[in-house]
Image: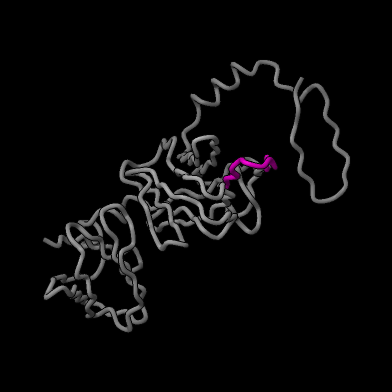
């Protein structure tokens, strides 16, 4: 017996005959796996009792809208005590969300999460294939103002209030943003130094009203502020130690070490 999920926006007639049936699922599944060359990231959310996942696929022909050839709608399980997990675009929940291949700009997609109040949750990458080695997958926790690099480790939190679409998003960051040498060669020269707990930053090109973020080695935002002029400015970082990343926007990211 075979079944089909059908989603419609208006009453219609659908005829399904024997020609649409899968007659040899083992052979077809194997063929799909061996021919698959698109980039793919599979995210998983889990508790001690439940697990769910959502998939992102990278394809040059994908669009920002729902693509019949690449995407899959999310179908809620509707059962109490189970996690819902998908991505969200224009009020549509996706199980598989295909987006265009990454260029030099990062892409951020909201996540749909209905978690279990009072339980510890873990969000992780369960599969990541056919992507450049240094590409990063950042989980953004908007409630706690944390950006966490899932490429390095899982993100764990305890839910205090069941949320659906406002707490988390995922940001895919191409390798070019993470390579300090390439960034310094491609953008204006930046001079960074510490003086009495204050980070001094000077650029050869000024940009006004720019949001500047400071991230630690785990990809967590430890400071952010909107500066009136980014030609030269200072930021207080009394407790920061080790390597930090200074994100001045427009893919201008500088790595700096604080002893």
Question: What residue sits 27% from the left and 58% below the top?
Answer: 216
Relative height, residue 222 to residue 176 (above, below): below
Say which quadrant the N terminus sits in.
top right
Confirm whether the magenta stretch covers residue 79.
yes
Asked whether 82 falls inside the magenta stretch, the response is yes
Q: Which residues are magenta?
A: 76-87
User: Seen in the image, is 142 located left or right of residue 65?
Assistant: left
Q: Looking at this view, name the residue that lies furthest to the bottom.
A: 228
Q: Residue pushed farthest front?
A: 118
Left or right for 22, reference 154:
right
- Compared to residue 139, the image places residue 195 above or below, namely below
In the image, 46 versus 139, the foreground residue is 46
Would you identify the image quadrant in which residue 197 lies?
Answer: bottom left
User: Which picture quadrant has residue 54?
Assistant: top right
Q: Position of residue 81 (x, y in %)?
A: 62, 41
At x 22% / y 78%, what residue is drawn? 234
User: Mainly helix, strand or loop, the magenta region?
Assistant: loop
Q: Quadrant of the image for the C terminus?
A: bottom left
The answer to whether 196 is drawn above or below residue 154 in the figure is below
């Amino acid at each position: 017996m075979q079944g089909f999920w059908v989603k419609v926006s208006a009453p219609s007639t659908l005829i399904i005959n024997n020609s649409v049936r899968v007659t040899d699922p083992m052979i077809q599944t194997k063929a799909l796996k061996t021919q698959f060359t698109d980039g793919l990231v599979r995210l998983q959310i889990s508790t001690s009792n439940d697990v769910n996942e959502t998939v992102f696929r990278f394809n040059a022909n994908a669009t920002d809208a729902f693509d019949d050839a690449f995407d899959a709608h999310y179908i809620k399980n509707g059962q109490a005590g189970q996690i819902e997990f998908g991505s969200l675009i224009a009020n549509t929940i996706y199980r598989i969300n295909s987006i265009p291949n990454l260029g030099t700009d990062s892409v951020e997609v909201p996540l749909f999460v209905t978690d279990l109040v009072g339980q510890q949750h873990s969000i992780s990458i369960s599969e990541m294939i056919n992507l450049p080695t240094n590409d990063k997958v950042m989980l953004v926790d908007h409630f706690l103002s944390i950006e966490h690099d899932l490429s390095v480790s899982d993100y764990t939190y305890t839910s205090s209030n069941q949320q659906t679409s406002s707490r988390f998003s995922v940001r895919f960051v191409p390798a070019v943003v993470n390579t300090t040498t390439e960034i310094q060669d491609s953008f204006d020269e930046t001079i960074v130094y510490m003086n009495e707990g204050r980070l001094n930053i000077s650029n050869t090109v000024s940009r006004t009203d720019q949001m500047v973020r400071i991230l630690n080695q785990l990809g967590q935002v430890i400071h952010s502020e909107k500066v009136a002029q980014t030609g030269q400015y200072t930021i207080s970082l009394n407790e920061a130690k080790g390597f930090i990343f200074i994100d001045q926007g427009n893919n201008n990211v500088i790595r700096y070490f604080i002893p």
